[in-house]
Image (cartoon, rainbow, N blue to C red):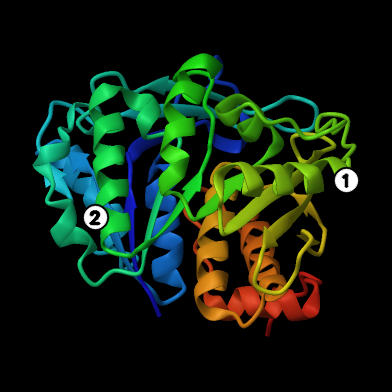
Amino acid sequence: MGQIVTFGEIMLRLSTPEHSRILQTDIFEARYAGGEANVAVSLAMFGHQAHFVTRLPENEVGEAALQSVRRYGVSTDYILRGGDRLGIYFLESGASQRPSKVIYDRADSAVSQMESNMVDWDAIFDGKDWFHWTGITPALGEKPRKAVIAACKAAKNAGVTVSCDLNFRSKLWTEEEAQATMNPLMEYVDVCIANEEDAQKSLGFEAGDTDVEGAELDDEGYSTLARSLKKEYGFDTVAITLRESFSASMNGWSAMLHDDKDCKEPVRSTRYEIDIVDRVGGGDSFAAGLIHGLLTKDNTQDALEYAVASSCLKHSIPGDFNLTSEEEVEKLVKSGGSGRVER
């Protein structure tokens, strides 16, 4: 198994119970979550040595966040302590035609005030195989932006494979800010993970006539997008998630992958129809599954099938973390997933 580093923010997630609205609830369910933390937990569940880099306040809330990833086997050796607060996000879980909503309360969080020289990136990447980051981290401000650049440079110098999930967040920065930052960072990336919105808003590339909200996918548009991204930035691998949003409760879920290992054209995965329990973290579980697949599988198609099946299972689990084992994912890949009770 691999030695994998992720870098980003972990937050306190406060979600409404049983699809209630923020306006009506008197209680919130508390969990800890964040894109790169989610990936680290999933990879640890698959048997890899996952290392999470972040900065947490030195108080009980920070300690609880640290323990939330440590309990699933993530190494916390590179987590810094300091800063005034942990970021928070509020989640109102949608249902049917009412979408889920996220409200951020993360200004001046500990990681957003993290200087790049607080971390010895060269030491962190010594002996490691993979580095994963997302577009969320540089969106947090100038200091984490510089830290991402320093981390990417150190990873490349160490010969470490670098993956990036573009993860555009309109509540954190504008398209212009995202493209000005993300385009130069792509020179360090080997594996790019995106959906059609991320590619358009973070990098300025469009995916044909796809209408996600109308649940219509333009396969040729996605294939062209994958080829264009690979050609423009020289990525080894481009993975694009394909979500058909019939409603907040029902989605079609599949993905496309383009690399030079086994195919000259993008390959498409199995498609799953998902009755959603919790959609948040679905993209992160795909990223973790893809990293696992690329590290352990013999061919492109198998790596993609593992990633999509992993993410499919995550949609059935409350919270951001994908608490599934390698065995469970493999079983879904082979069986197609009847959902029958195991006795």
Name the residue beneath numbered marker 2: 67
For the residues carrying marks 2 and 1, which lies nearer the camera in this image? 1
Amino acid type at image mark 2: Gln
Look at the image and tell me in which quarter the N terminus lies: bottom left
Q: Position of residue 330 (x, y in %)?
A: 65, 79
Please tell me whether residue 21 is drawn above or below residue 28 in the rendered image: above
- The reply to whether residue 43 is visible in this rendering is yes
Q: Position of residue 324 (x, y in %)?
A: 53, 68
Q: Position of residue 15 (x, y in %)?
A: 49, 33
- Dot 2 lies on which element? helix
Q: CA distance from mark 2 to mark 1?
A: 45 Å
Q: At 70% from the left edge and 42% from the top edge, which residue is drawn?
A: 228
Q: At 63% from the left edge and 57% from the top edge, which residue is drawn?
A: 311
- In this image, 59 relative to 261: left or right? left
Give the image quarter of residue 17. Answer: top right
Discs 2, 1 touching: Cβ within 8 Å: no
Picture disc at residue 93 = none
Q: Position of residue 134 (x, y in %)?
A: 44, 42
Please tell me whether residue 184 is drawn above or below residue 335 in the rendered image: above
At label 1, counting other C-alpha atoms closer than 10 Å, the crowd grade (few under 14, some 14-19, many 20 or more) is: some
Give the image quarter of residue 13. Answer: top left
At label 2, counting other C-alpha atoms closer than 10 Å, the crowd grade (few under 14, some 14-19, many 20 or more) is: some
Give the image quarter of residue 279. Answer: top right
Q: At 36% from the left edge and 31% from the top edge, which residue is drawn?
A: 138
Amino acid type at image mark 1: Glu
- Dot 1 lies on which element? helix
Q: Nearer the viewer, residue 56 or 254?
A: 254
- In this image, 58 relative to 343: left or right? left
- The reply to whether residue 174 is visible in this rendering is no
Q: Nearer the viewer, residue 301 or 74?
A: 301
Picture disc at residue 220 = 1
